[in-house]
Amino acid sequence: MNRGVPIKKLPFLMMYTVRGCPFSCNFCASNENFGKTVRQRSAESVVAEIEYYKEKYGIKQVLFNDDLLVINKKQIHRFCDLLLERKTDIVWGCFSKG
């Protein structure tokens, strides 16, 4: 399910990089399913996985299905910096609060 984010390039990959949620929204079960402690993969780990799938399967777009991808501003800036430094030519999008 892409929840309205346009798929611009094929093939594409869906990724989850964050688990847990410190909020208690009455419409969401994220903290019930994954706990209140936020656990986020490093930017380096995420970019390395993207590069792997780009090399192995030729992916051209990544859709992040994380609710809290941008909760850590320093982390998302590092992610963007790494994509630019490594010249990782992909389109990406996310759904996020935070």
Image (cartoon, rainbow, N blue to C red):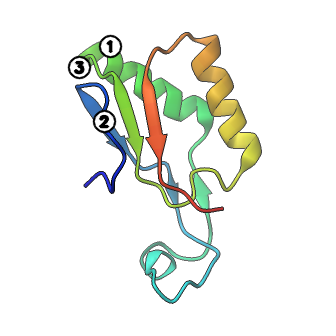
Residue at the spot 57% in from the left edge and 59% down from the top edge: 68
Q: Quadrant of residue 77?
A: top right
Look at label 1 and name its amino acid: Glu
Element on which disc 3 rests? helix
Image position of 81 (left or right of 58)? right
* Foreground residue among 52 and 26: 26
Question: Is residue 95 or residue 69 the one in the foreground?
Answer: 95
Residue 44 % position (x, y): 59, 29
Q: Are marks 2 and 3 in contact (CB under 8 Å)?
A: yes
Q: Residues within 10 Å of mark 1 (few under 14, many from 20)?
A: few
Q: Which residue is mark 2?
A: 13
| Mark 2 or mark 3: whose residue is earlier in sequence | 2
Q: Residue at x 61, y 35 (%)?
A: 43
Q: Are marks 1 and 3 in contact (CB under 8 Å)?
A: no
Reply above or below: 3 against 25: above
Residue type, label 3: Tyr
Quarter of the picture containing the N terminus is: bottom left
Residue where numbered disc 1 is placed: 55
Marks 2/3: CA–CA distance: 10 Å
